Amino acid sequence: MVNEPPPRPSFRPLALMAALMVATAWPARANDSAAELSIGGLQFVRTNDVAMESEDLRIALDKVSVRYQFANITNKPVTLTVAFPLPDIDLSEADNIALPSNDPVNFVDFETKVDGSPAPLTIDQRAMIGDKDVSAQLRQFKLPLLPIGSQEIRVADLPATIRTRLVDDGLLMPAGMSDNGRQQYAPGWVTRTSAVRQQVFPPARTVVVEHQYRPSVGSSADTILRASLRRTSALSPEVARYRKQYCVTDAFLAELDKRAGDGQANSAKLQERRISYVLKTGANWAGPIRSFKLTIDAGGSDRLVSFCQGRLKASSAGGTPEYTASDFKPVTDLKILVIGKF
């Protein structure tokens, strides 16, 4: 199995929204911004025995779907460990992360099929504080490892003795005061989730693996790229980061200015959506991906999309943007920016 840990979520959007509120005198609202998690496709051990014939990746705001075709290039069966790496969830920041689902285990609602038949993965979930596994301590008090949705922990309802024990063990951390002066607490652990299975690739035959899940979509109620904001000196480092990370062109900004104008207020009510997709693990095969296709569905032709396409070539067929490459070896991950009305 790939031993590289999944990427940690980036909370730059929170710093961005703080800067926007200073620049525009907006009132602070908890839902102004949410950070996206970096999630990708299936991962396998690095191998020279199996080649990826094709990968058809479709990214939409509500679903990511991938169709792979693999070919065993040896004359004997090859068994590989298949993993779907879910990102670590730092619960001290969980309120600011865009979690796609309230399922406390499969929080991206992923599904996998092999040759058309469901192929579930075995999920292992642990609670960690640093390198220490604290799952058993949480289970002792009948507390969920990922407290979201119906599993959310109501600290105020916990017996005082248990609450004190959790604080002493570092499982709960002080998190400010409530309006009535009561101490608030936040979980102090990181939830680590892994999903794995064994897959056999028979010789001289193609195996089709299909995979879909709900992506973690970052959001902001405005966009830093509006003319009145991007020309603010205090925001210039963030604007430069956006332009580099999403390969934002002058033509993209010109179209945005046409729609948004240059007024201080966001009168056009444009918002941001951001998706981060881990693509580099597609380089684990015997040779490059022979045929790669990326489709980006922004949910409407009136929305602006920007990302770094590298050597991917845009296709003019149809209304939904498609990008293709032959003998493709991904060297960077995808960072996709969508601006429009939602």
Image (cartoon, rainbow, N blue to C red):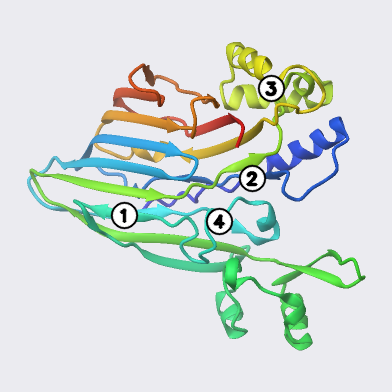
Tag 4 secondary structure: loop
Q: Position of residue 88 (x, y in %)?
A: 55, 56
- Please report contact status of discs 4 and 2: CB closer than 8 Å, yes or no: no
Q: CA distance from mark 4 to mark 1?
A: 21 Å
Q: CA distance from mark 3 to mark 2?
A: 19 Å
Residue 34 falls left or right of residue 198 = right
Q: Position of residue 29 (x, y in %)?
A: 79, 48
Q: Which residue is mark 1?
A: 112
Q: Which residue is mark 3?
A: 240
Tag 1 secondary structure: strand
Q: Earlier in the sequence, mark 2 or mark 1?
A: 2
Q: Which disc, if any, is residue 35? A: 2
What amino acid does circle 1 point to?
Thr
Residue at the image point whose x is 63% and y is 34% from the top: 272
Front tag of 1 and 3: 1
Q: Position of residue 7 (x, y in %)?
A: 54, 46
Residue at the image point whose x is 69% and y is 22% from the top: 240
What amino acid does circle 3 point to?
Ala
